[in-house]
Amino acid sequence: MRKIIGQCNTSDFATLAHLSGLMERGEEVDLTNLTNRQKVAVRVLDHFINQNIPLKTLSKIREVLVWDMGDGGAGFEYKLIDPGDSETLAILRGYR
């Protein structure tokens, strides 16, 4: 059974933009003082970095749902600011 394990949105990414540089350099990020939404945003940032998805893509995303896929993995569902943005959709689909 799949279930949603987290959710974040554009404002969560904007709040954490300064962490992306640290994460890209492979530095550890302390999550203890972050909200649950911010922790999910860090997870999405990490996913983007690991999959070489350009971080500028985050500015095109309204919301992300993170799903527990039941096999220990996570699935990411993206809701775009502009649902007709086929370029961003192609970028995100290319990294599945």
Image (cartoon, grey):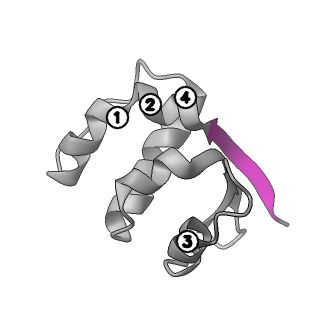
Mark-to-mark CA distance, 1 and 4: 10 Å
- Of circles 2 and 3, the one toward us is 3
Q: Secondary structure at mark 2?
A: helix
Query: Which residue bears the numbered disc 1?
Result: 17
- Of circles 3 and 4, the one toward us is 3
Q: Amino acid at mark 1?
A: Ala
- Look at 63% across and 71% down and name the residue there: 86
Mark 1 Cα shell of 10 Å, populated few (<14), some (14-19), many (≥20): some
Query: Which residue bears the numbered disc 3?
Result: 87
Magenta span contains residue 6: yes
Q: Secondary structure at mark 3?
A: helix
Instruction: Compare marks 1 and 3 and give the one earlier in the sequence.
Output: 1
Is 83 in front, or is 61? 83
| The N terminus - image quarter | bottom right
Asked whether the residues under the numbered discs 4 and 2 touch, taking CB atoms below 8 Å apart as contact, a structural biologist would say yes
Q: Amino acid at mark 3?
A: Glu
Mark linked to residue 61: none
Mark-to-mark CA distance, 1 and 3: 22 Å
Image quadrant where residue 10 sits: top right
Q: Amino acid at mark 4?
A: Ser
Instruction: Compare marks 3 and 4 and give the one earlier in the sequence.
Output: 4
Q: Is residue 38 visible?
A: no
- Look at 34% across and 34% down and name the residue there: 17
- Look at 54% across and 22% down and name the residue there: 35
Helix, strand or loop: magenta stretch: strand
Mark linked to residue 11: 4
Instruction: Compare marks 2 and 3 and give the one earlier in the sequence.
Output: 2
Residue farthest along the right direction in this orientation: 1
Is 26 in front, or is 51? 51
Magenta residues span 2-8
Asked whether the residues under the numbered discs 1 and 2 touch, taking CB atoms below 8 Å apart as contact, a structural biologist would say yes
